[in-house]
Amino acid sequence: MRSILIMSGSPALVLRLVASAYSVAEKAGSIVRQVLHSGDLGIVEKTGANDLQTLADRLAQQSICASLSRRFPKITIIGEEELLFEDVKEELIENGQADDILQKSCPEGYKGLKEEELVVWVDPLDGTKEYTEGLLDNVTVLIGIAYGGRAIAGVINQPFYNYQVGAGAVLGRTMWGMAGIGAFGFQLQEVPGDQRIVTTTRSHSNKVVTDCVDAMEPHEVIRVGGAGNKIIQLVEGKASAYVFASQGCKKWDTCAPEAILHAAGGKLTDMFGNSYCYDANVKHMNSAGVLATLRNHDYYVSRVPQSVLQALKSD
Ligand code: AMP
Ligand code: MG
Ligand code: MG
């Protein structure tokens, strides 16, 4: 009996955190759906008309941050929205943990991680602009986990996945990934052949952004909302590179997507090809843009024009 207890042990802290983040992201996704169905989005402009917050952003963040901080009180949790999460309504709290994640074997290097060493980056609703415009499959909930400055695990919930399929289809899905374990919840696919299909912003474009997309000599350009959504396009073989040569994306936009992309064999950097750091004290803005690929990252880095790099440097 004793040896069985020692053998099974309790799952490593970081696995319990990912398992909680999975359930919490599902709850947040259901909140995002409920607010839409209520018909009153409660839209507030933050820095301007292209930087919105809705009731769904607020409630989902409260739900995620309060649920995770109750269970893991010493973890640093950084959410996009400036909100308190001490007095959150009980109905917003999620206590579940995804069982199949708890069953995974934790990579040796992560077994001993402590709460104090982990940082959680939360984007409660990525693609808010698209949410308000009814482009529902652009919307995701992002929970990223960082250790030692690296994005090591992430969960993406896509609340309206399948919404155009109609009755009978299950609405919403959750993907997750962790370094050394793998990426789950989707079918990993590559863009066929040597097609360069570039995905980029639809609502935060400017001349530098489009110059950089053009420099990739793409066969096709897709303009969609959301950082999470664009990473899903990469791992599902709909796009070969996510190119955004501008500031605007923040650490909570890229942490979970980067971790899942990386676990699937891909890479996310700034436009210079340098990695971002996800420590608790870093600045939130990804000032040097976002370049993400499943394959051939160096090709895309090599195509970024000097003029674009210069523009990003002076930001
Ligand atoms: P997009 O590709 O435009 O949907 O942007 C991906 C993420 O970065 C979303 O969370 C956006 O809100 C954020 N973002 C990008 N550019 C800006 C910007 N100029 N102002 C505010 N948020 C931005
Ligand atoms: Mg976002
Ligand atoms: Mg957001």
Image: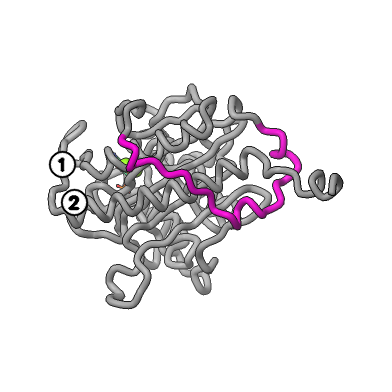
Q: Is residue 120 visible?
A: yes
Task: Residue at 56% x, 52% y: name it.
Answer: 177
Looking at the image, which residue sits at the far top? 281
Estimate the x, y position of residue 170 in percent, counting from the top left. 37, 70
Q: Residue at 48% x, 67% y: name it.
A: 237
Q: Foreground residue, 300 or 67?
A: 67
Circle 2 residue = 132
Q: CA distance from mark 2 to mark 1?
A: 8 Å
Q: Is residue 140 left or right of residue 5?
A: left
Q: Position of residue 143 (x, y in %)?
A: 45, 43
Amino acid identity at mark 1:
Ile
- x and y percent of residue 11 in the render? 68, 44
- Would the CB of label 1 be found within 8 Å of ligand 3? no
Element marked by disc 1: loop
Mark 2 or 1 closer to N-term?
1
Most prominent secondary structure in the magenta stretch?
A: loop
Residue placed most toward the observer, 220 or 97: 97
Residue appearing at x 51%, y 69% in the figure: 194
- Residue 112 in magenta stretch: yes
Circle 2/circle 1 CB separation < 8 Å: yes
Q: Identify residue for label 1.
A: 43
- Report the span colored magenta: 89-113
Whether the magenta-drawn stretch holds residue 2 is answered as no
Rendered-image quadrant of the C terminus: top left
Q: Secondary structure at mark 2?
A: helix
